[in-house]
Image: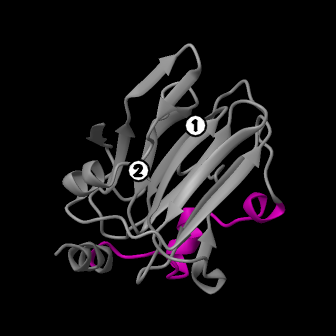
Amino acid sequence: MKVRELSVSGAFEFSPATFPDGRGLFVSPYSAAAFTEALGFPLHVAQSNHSVSRRGVLRGVHYAMVPPGQAKYVYCPRGALLDVVIDLRVGSPTFGQWDSVRCDDMDFRATYLSEGLGHAFMALEDDTVMSYLCSTPYNPSAEYTISPLDPALGLAWPEDVTPVLSDRDRDAPTLAQMQADGLLPTYDVCQARYAALRP
């Protein structure tokens, strides 16, 4: 398993080895040993999610308030998608910046995003599946969304794909609006959360 930290601190790309043969293919998208070595603590999984999207479906930007927040380990077992991580932590050196990983059923790259980071993705093929391992259960009272088309974020979605959004994501506020309303996590609180996870 190869691991690299993205340009947004607290976000990582995991690239597993794949083993194709005449029968098909075997891959292990998640390794507890590799994760713990990279992050310094094990991944606590409280919930797993599974979404299926047609080409062009754009989900996000979603995040949960910290504490406790919700960290996610996501991969694509079928199809292809562009996975995007956005730093929403007020006071972070990379606040407002983002990075992306192409996840697909060829390389099976996975993305981990720490608590306080925003998440969005666009399906690049029909019947694209996204699987999530989540550190905390879904808590609607602490879940928020920011427009994935916010010009200030400048997320580089593929120009040859027409975005298909839910009403919630289409009508979501901008990053600046959420910051003005005090509805973004802070860098200091997130750092305290990360430190509490380490033995």
**Pick the front one: 20 or 194:** 20
Query: Which of the two labelled residues, at mark 2 and mark 1, occupies the earlier sequence position?
Result: 1
Callout 2 amino acid: Gln
Q: Toward which corner of the image does residue 173 lie, by quadrant?
A: bottom right
x, y percentage for residue 62?
59, 63
Q: Give x and y (percent) for residue 66.
A: 42, 80
Observer-side mark, 2 or 1, equals 1
Asked if residue 40 lies in the magenta stretch, the reply is no
Residue identifier under label 1: 82
Question: Which residue lies at the image location 52% right of the left edge and 79% below the top edge?
Answer: 183
Q: Nearer the viewer, residue 20 or 53?
A: 20
Q: Is residue 25 above or below residue 94?
A: above
Can residue 37 be seen here? yes
Q: Is residue 40 left or right of residue 166?
A: left
Residue stretch rendered in magenta on the structure: 167-188
Name the residue carrying label 2: 97
The kind of secondary structure element at disc 1 is strand
Residues at badges 2 and 1 in contact (C-beta under 8 Å)? Answer: no
Q: Residues within 10 Å of mark 2 (few under 14, many from 20)?
A: some
Q: Is residue 142 left or right of residue 167?
A: left
| Residue 199 x %, y % | 16, 75
Please state which amino acid type lies under the numbered disc 1: Leu
Looking at this view, is 18 or 154 the one in front?
18
